[in-house]
Amino acid sequence: MRIMLLIDFGSTFTKGVMIDLEGEEVIAKASVSSTVDRDVRLGLSELLVELRGQTSDRLVKNAPKLACSSAAGGLRMVVIGLVPELTVEAGRKAACNAGAKVIGSIAGVMDDPALLQLAALKPDLILLSGGTDGGNKEVIISNAVLLAGTQINVPVIIAGNKNAVRECRGALEKMGKAVVVTENVMPSVNCLHIEPARETIRRVFIDRIAKAKGINTVQNQVALLMPTPNAVLQAVAILAQGTPEEEGLGELLVIDVGGATTDVYSAGAGMPTMTNVILKGLPEPFVKRTVEGDLGVRHNALSIVELVGMTQLLKDAGFSSAEGKRVMEYCQTLPPEQLPREAWEFEVDSGLAKAAVRLGVERHVGSLKLAYIPGAGETFIQTGKDLRGLKTIIGTGGPVIFAKEPCAILNEAVFDPRTPHLLKPAQPRFMLDKTYILYALGLLSGQYPHRALHLAKKNLQLMHCP
Amino acid sequence: MEDEGNPATLVMGVIGSDSHAIGNRILAYALNEAGYNVINLGSFVSQEEFINAAIESSVDVILVSSLCGHAEIDCQGFKNKLIEAGLQDTLLYIGGTLAVGETKWEDIEQRFKKIGFTRIAPPYTRPGEVIKWLHEDLDKRKNTKVA
């Protein structure tokens, strides 16, 4: 037997799954409380004890161990660029796909308030972009000089105009800042080029940020490879596209509802599906991740109430308006690690999850705007991905997996004729990541893409919805 | 901006709710052949898209096309926005069917001069003519910079 152990160091839980590569089977699974605030190794030892109990000392000891992490706040990034719709957006896309949480973005030359704001955000990492190759140099250089003059001492990745790189790097290094250079996220106008930046972010995360957060103390026991969302993104890519030997599931959407955030991943081209549509805006990557920092059923329960309104939340949860006060209290007082116990609590959670899925997917997918053209009549302008033809939606994350009716929650991701401009999947089937295995398959996919694909097909559960 | 020996960068596109793309492609081809670095935004281009592209790529000239007859409305406030964006020195050209009906060309030209366009091309202007203008204007600019 060839056994691999895949680990996710989360903020709340440290999870592990043991996989028999030859049998393509999950042989053990465990989850323990994370101990990142004290010593990440404590949680790891506890996890290994659990897994030894389910298998054997020898198997756990000998299994190669790969890990991802979203602990200690995950990877918090600020993106600096020039034009909000162009290099700033390209930088955000690179950061999101790398598994980061973009906690701030700055366009143009930074002024004093922007610098103060940047320092206050306390990012783990800064992505500095701006200018196409051969284009504007002044702004990115000014920003590098300004950044160099601050007390901010986190790594800076330069991913802007290649003709400005030398000066940017010089200015920052002169002041002792850690600099990593990669290719421009937007080498020419409207050309998205985020893969090199994504890989660089992953590397910097492993080499420097995991160390700063104290997560790297496990490095002699496990190989920490990437942030958790990056691992999920890898799984999404292989699951959709397949391997040279075997077909994948085709274009798909993965929705991960959590306590703090809702992550949406799509694998799909999203090109216009009608002839009278003109595509505008920055191109979308085939595999795309968006993360909603204001949509989560615990830390952000109140933010969901604020966004959709109590009336709508009660409707989503299937309650009468009389329950408003009680629901509000629940959202206000709920401890983040608390799982629902009574039926009533399951219903509130399900209401919150529905709202999170609806808003998260609405923000992820593209939209249409109607325009009248003299002579040509009605024409639509599309920005973002048209995912109406996408056939598979996969739900993951506790609030979806453990819900009484996951179908009802995932249904919120489906095209709604009342908002026809939002290009959500029209007739998808639903699948559930019941064993919470996607991150593990992402970790596995680098070395064993074929096995990862098989395990995904085996472990994702097709839902039969009413 | 244009460095010694580097070709000038141009951004072009069809402005507003206008899907006429053929002339745009012909002109883009001709300008490319003439050695310019051309960023073609295609049809349906808003003022903001022209400006964004011009900022990121340090563009020397913006060439606006319009065939639907609504150019005057589509271009309202364009020059002011360029000034706001720090692009007051970017040259602004326009060409195409710039008005509908029987309006005299001189009147049309005046209106677009007022908006801030420096070169206004009537229908049937050949790409060669535009290239000649570019040579003249960019040369003039280089000389004033040196002086």
Image: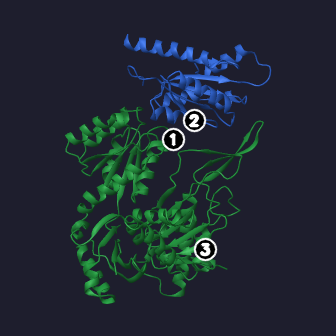
Chain colours: A green, B blue
- Residue at 19% over, 45% down: A176
- Helix, strand or loop under label 3: helix
The vertical placement of A418 against B33, above or below, is: below
Q: Is residue B94 above or below residue A167?
A: above
Residue at image mark 3: A316
Same-chain check, marks 3 and 1: yes
Q: How many marks?
A: 3
Lower sequence index among marks 3 and 1: 1
Disc 2 packing (10 Å; few <14; some 14–19; many ≥20): many
Residue A24 x %, y %: 43, 78
Toward the viewer: A375 or B135? B135
Amino acid at dot 2: Leu
Q: CA distance from mark 1 to mark 2?
A: 9 Å
Chain letter of disc 1 in the image:
A
Secondary element type, mark 1: loop
Q: Which residue is mark 2?
A: B41
Q: Is residue A308 left or right of residue A15?
A: right
Answer yes or no: do the residues labelled 3 and 1 have beta carbons within 8 Å?
A: no
User: Residue A175 placed where, x, y %?
Assistant: 20, 42
Alpha carbon distance from label 3 to label 1: 39 Å
The reply to whether label 1 and label 2 mark residues of one chain is no
Crowd tier of the residue under label 1, counting other residues whose Cα lies within 10 Å: few below 14, some 14–19, many 20 or above: some
